Amino acid sequence: MDFTIAQLKRGEKAIIKQFSENDVPLKLLEMGCLPGNSVEMIQSAPFQDPIYLNVNGTHLAIRRETAEKIIVERYG
């Protein structure tokens, strides 16, 4: 089973492996949300949406729906 960014707990780190679909917003790719980059869950807003992340030093807020499409491998 694949593990996604949406399943990360606060403070957990992971490496982006791939996208489950090809319709990931271009803006995310431009901000460094690419396979091979590290991602850390900073926090999630009330009701778990949006999710706040640190991707290679850039802080992003993404929708849970989008986070469920980004497959990662946890570490640390």
Image: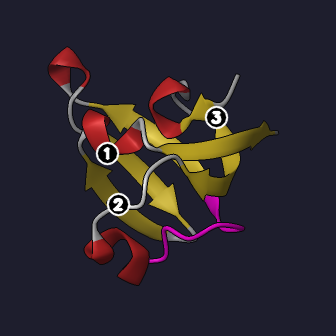
Neighbourhood count class around disc 1 (C-alpha, 10 Å): few under 14, some 14–19, many 20 upward: some
Q: At 22% across and 38% down in the image, what residue appears? A: 50
Residue carrying label 3: 12
Neighbourhood count class around disc 3 (C-alpha, 10 Å): few under 14, some 14–19, many 20 upward: some
Element type where label 1 sits in the image: helix
Pick the front one: 12 or 27? 27
Foreground tag (3 vs 1) = 1
Q: Which residues are magenta?
A: 32-38
**Do the CB atoms of the residues marked 2 and 3 lie less than 8 Å apart?**
no
Q: At 66% across and 30% down in the image, what residue appears? A: 2
As for residue 34 lying within the magenta part, the answer is: yes
Q: Is residue 28 above or below residue 67?
A: below
Q: Quadrant of residue 43?
A: top left
Residue positioned most to the front: 22
Q: Which numbered disc, 3 or 1, marks the residue that appears first in the sequence?
A: 3
Residue carrying label 2: 24
Q: Amino acid at mark 3?
A: Glu
Q: Amino acid at mark 2?
A: Val
**Do the CB atoms of the residues marked 1 and 2 lie less than 8 Å apart?**
yes
Q: Amino acid at mark 1?
A: Thr
Residue carrying label 1: 66
